[in-house]
Image (cartoon, helix red, strand yellow):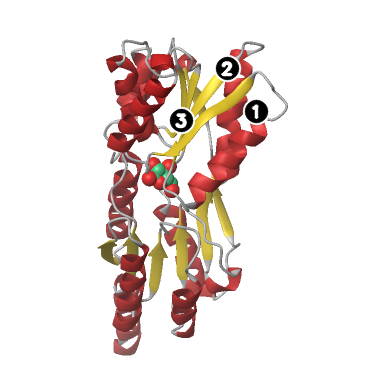
Amino acid sequence: SATILAACMFTSASAKDLVVGFSQIGSESGWRAAETTLTKQEAKKRGIDLKFADAQQKQENQIKAIRSFIAQGVDAILLAPVVETGWDAVLKEAKEAKIPVILLDRTVAAPKDLYLTAVTSDLVHEGKVAGDWLVKTVGDKKCNIVELQGTTGSSPAIARKKGFEEAIKGHDNLKIVRSQTGDFTRAKGKEVMESFLKAENGGKDICALYAHNDDMAVGAIQAIKEAGLKPGKDILTVSIDSVPDLFKAMAAGEANATVELTPNMAGPAFDALDAYLKTKKEPPKWIQTESKLYTQADDPQKVYEQKKDLGY
Ligand code: AHR
């Protein structure tokens, strides 16, 4: 009947009309670019109207974007928070406006009732996996480590440092001799690595590099080569993300290990949102993604071929 048809039309139109605001950090890394691409693809696939805002690494821009999403009356907000603290006020505003917020890939230090759920990996565990790999690889050898940290104050920088330190604790032959932020970028990773190399006898006193993401490792690998040393041999590398370029470096024998972080955080986020809007039942506060270790034993050339067209 006409009434039934009208009802159906309304249902399908309202599903299609879902408007979601996405406050993205910026485009500091290959991983971040892939997350942006995949989030847009996932939204399109599901008929979601995604309002995208690039914060260019600034929390104040993210707060402005969230306020503008609230003013526009969006149905939900995705937030990849650049730093961990300073979110309470704006998250409260979203809650008061009854707009669910889903955190993507990074966590916040705010009361849990201020967001619907967080889709992230176990960030401490990632650092631990990287550290465990190095402990196993160097055995009893003395190993001076240099560390390239992610963006200061960001949850992955804090947690990946913690996890790695936990893993090497009690192994007195392993020591972090230099640690500085490289802001998760290739350029800064290279620049900071150059200063580490200079400070450590041209790099001869460095046994391993731990980088909080692959992009910084790729920049550092370049610096190591320019210093006349062999990355992957003279200086071991372990990092996080598993972006295609790191597999390229691994295939060339210039990188040793990477812990995978999926860039498709939006898939599980939209699934959770969909279920929540349908049932009003809250999802678990944490939707955890996997952290898999890849080494040179995993046919890096093949992994590179598989990954290179996946949005990176
Ligand atoms: O929050 C995830 C991290 O942010 C990625 O590991 C890094 O590449 C990105 O910039």
Based on the displayed image, in which of its 4 quarters is residue 312 positioned? top left
* 52 on left or right of 183: left
Ligand 1 shows up in the quarter that is: top left
Task: Identify the amino acid type marked 1.
Answer: Ile
Residue 68, horizontal then vertical, whole percent: 30, 77
Give the label on residue 143, or none: 2
Disc nearer the start of the sequence (1/2) = 2
* 29 on left or right of 168: left
Say which of 153 and 284 sits in front. Answer: 153
For label 1, the SS is helix
Residue 29 visible in the current orientation: yes
Q: Which one is closest to the eye, mark 1 or mark 2?
A: 2
Q: Which residue appears at 29% of the width and 88% of the height?
A: 2
Say which of 233 and 193 sits in front. Answer: 193
Q: Which residue appears at 54% of the width and 76% of the height?
A: 280
Q: What's the distance in space between the residues labelled 3 and 2, CA to CA? A: 17 Å
Q: Which one is closest to the eye, mark 3 or mark 2?
A: 2
Say which of 189 and 43 sits in front. Answer: 189
